[in-house]
Image: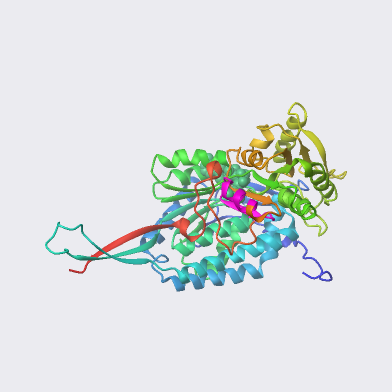
């Protein structure tokens, strides 16, 4: 957008007046209890959705199973599957403001940022998955039995290794980037040839119901993509226990992932877990410190810190610590806080007041009894409700402090100082998480040495956040999950050996 272009405006008519339904075998249905869709910034009910009944969950799984077993989608040649995904990408592109608006109105996500990042990445996810299957190739090798088992060299074996879709996927999704994260997962699963029952978060069901319509119009056969709405402990639980589901894919917290992993083990389902993080932002004194202040601020406060890869631990070399932390706190204090649809807003409401209370609890415990110093940050303007939390910078945390060890999922930085590279590394690697990390230094050898030793699936040097999903991502370490990324996460290799005689 240029400086002169008018910012997009949220249109309340994008929210359906009827409750959002389930989408089963290509048809919208709904018999369950009506649940409210609330704008966290105003507390006003803006729409509603229907919780899936047991029978609806059952029918959704049956539809996915039937479509997979009949092969209507998985047997389509990859290029034909790619065409559907490409058409879906184009349709999403034309409806980005509406789809992102639905996410923003129910989660507090800031509209302009959501359009620029989440909207772009949702389109990118479908185009990227389509490109992957257009290019995908298996492996062919020649083999033979060990010598001496047969006269001569024995039969020649041609071994073909291909990748099959895993089967029926239960896709459980979070609320912090519903369309973006959901599109990454769904596009990968569809590209692989899987059939899906997706359960968006109860906080953000609307964009996924619309996505189902987009996929249907793009030519996806009925039953391949089904959406059921409801809570994790009811609807989600039924999905993960059902024997007709082959793969459970969870994007969520470590607590949820752990619970689901345990349950899925009893039926030996495959499980992909993309879970929480506590990314360190490690700053050496030889870095470009002006740039660091901006990156560190963005790392922690983008999307109100409700980001799995948010850089919430700021580790700064002692000689630069005071300047860097003061600069980050100064930048934080100027971030506009307000309505998520106001084009000036950087910090909108958190997903709900209960979550905001949880975030404030972490800060209170860190400052009152946890030894942390409140360095600075912003102030919530008068008139805003309890879902708003000002960006906050805490300093001089003790090693192992609660707020250093747990994902807060709010706009809070915990800063620490270090004296040596070894100390920085030990502290950076000192949590249960291993999703993402960044290191800032002017010394390229140190940057690589440090990146090599960081326990994280994704490491950025002199910036934070992966640029876009055009580049492949690493896999999570430690309790951040087990997930593979992209199309491969939904495939199972199969080898077929042919006796050539
Ligand atoms: P969450 O509470 O763990 O929920 C994730 C999904 O799992 C939701 O759809 C939830 O349903 C469902 N669920 C919860 N308990 C369940 C159970 N017992 N059985 C079956 N399903 C269950 O996570 P969230 O609060 O929505 O999202 C924030 C978390 O996601 C953060 O930890 C963040 O780091 C993580 N995340 C990770 C990535 C990544 O790529 N690594 C990306 C984005 C977010 P309901 O919530 O509707 O009840």
The quarter in which the N terminus is drawn is bottom right
Residue 67 in picture, x, y percent from top left = 41, 61
Residue 54 in picture, x, y percent from top left = 48, 45
Q: Residue placed farthest to the right in the image?
A: 382
Residue 238 in picture, x, y percent from top left = 47, 44
* The residue stretch that appears in magenta: 446-465
Look at the image and say whether residue 451 sits in the magenta stretch. Answer: yes
27 or 244, nearer to the observer = 244
Write the residue at 43% across / 55% down.
168
Look at the image and say whether residue 304 sits in the magenta stretch. Answer: no
Residue 160 in picture, x, y percent from top left = 31, 65
The answer, for residue 290, to whether it is visible in the render is: yes
492 or 40, nearer to the observer = 492
Q: Quadrant of ligand 1?
A: top right
Q: Quadrant of residue 152?
A: bottom left
Q: Residue placed farthest to the left in the image?
A: 151
Residue 241 is left or right of residue 451, and the answer is left
Q: Is residue 75 above or below residue 437?
A: below
The quarter in which the C terminus is drawn is bottom left
Q: Is residue 387 above or below residue 498?
A: above
Q: Is residue 432 above or below residue 14?
A: above
The answer, for residue 108, to whether it is visible in the render is: no
């Amino acid at each position: 957008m240029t400086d002169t272009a008018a910012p997009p405006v949220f249109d309340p008519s994008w929210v359906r007046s009827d409750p959002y339904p389930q989408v089963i075998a290509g048809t919208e249905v709904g018999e369950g209890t009506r649940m409210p869709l609330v704008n966290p910034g105003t507390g006003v009910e803006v729409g509603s959705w229907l919780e899936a009944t047991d029978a609806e969950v059952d029918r959704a799984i049956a539809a996915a199973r039937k479509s997979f077993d009949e092969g209507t989608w998985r047997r389509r040649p990859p290029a034909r599957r790619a065409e559907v995904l490409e058409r879906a990408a184009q349709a999403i592109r034309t409806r980005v403001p509406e789809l992102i608006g639905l996410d923003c109105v129910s989660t507090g996500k800031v509209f302009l940022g959501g359009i620029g990042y989440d909207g772009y990445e949702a389109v990118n996810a479908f185009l990227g998955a389509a490109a992957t299957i257009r290019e995908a190739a298996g492996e062919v090798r020649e083999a033979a039995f060990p010598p001496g088992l047969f006269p001569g060299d024995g039969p020649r074996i041609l071994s073909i290794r291909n990748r099959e879709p895993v089967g029926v996927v239960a896709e459980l999704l979070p609320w912090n980037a519903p369309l973006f994260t959901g599109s990454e997962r769904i596009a990968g699963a569809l590209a692989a040839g899987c059939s899906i029952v997706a359960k968006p978060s109860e906080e953000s069901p609307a964009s996924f119901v619309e996505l189902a319509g987009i996929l249907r119009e793009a030519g996806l056969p009925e039953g391949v993509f089904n959406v059921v709405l409801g809570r994790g402990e009811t609807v989600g639980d039924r999905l993960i226990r059902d024997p007709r589901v082959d793969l459970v894919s969870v994007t969520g917290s470590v607590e949820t992932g752990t619970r689901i992993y345990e349950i899925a083990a009893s039926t030996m389902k495959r499980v992909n877990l993309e879970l929480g993080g506590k990314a360190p932002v490690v700053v050496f004194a030889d870095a470009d410190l002006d740039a660091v202040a901006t990156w560190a601020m963005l790392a922690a406060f983008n999307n109100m810190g409700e980001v799995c890869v948010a850089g919430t631990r700021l580790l700064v070399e002692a000689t630069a610590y005071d300047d860097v932390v003061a600069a980050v706190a100064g930048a934080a204090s100027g971030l506009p806080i307000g309505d998520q649809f106001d084009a000036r807003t950087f910090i909108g409401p958190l997903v709900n007041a209960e979550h905001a209370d949880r975030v404030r609890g972490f800060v209170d415990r860190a400052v009152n009894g946890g030894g942390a110093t409140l360095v600075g940050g912003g102030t919530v303007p008068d008139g805003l409700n309890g879902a708003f939390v000002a960006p906050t910078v805490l300093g001089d945390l003790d090693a192992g402090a609660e707020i250093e060890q747990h994902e807060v999922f709010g706009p809070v930085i915990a800063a620490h100082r270090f004296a040596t590279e070894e100390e920085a590394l030990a502290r950076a690697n000192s949590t249960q998480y291993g999703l993402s990390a960044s290191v800032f230094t002017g010394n390229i050898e140190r940057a690589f040495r440090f990146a090599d030793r960081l326990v994280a699936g994704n490491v950025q040097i002199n910036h934070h956040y992966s640029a876009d999903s055009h580049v492949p991502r690493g896999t999570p370490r430690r309790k951040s999950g087990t997930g593979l990324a992209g199309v491969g996460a939904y495939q199972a290799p199969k080898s077929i050996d042919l006796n050539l005689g």
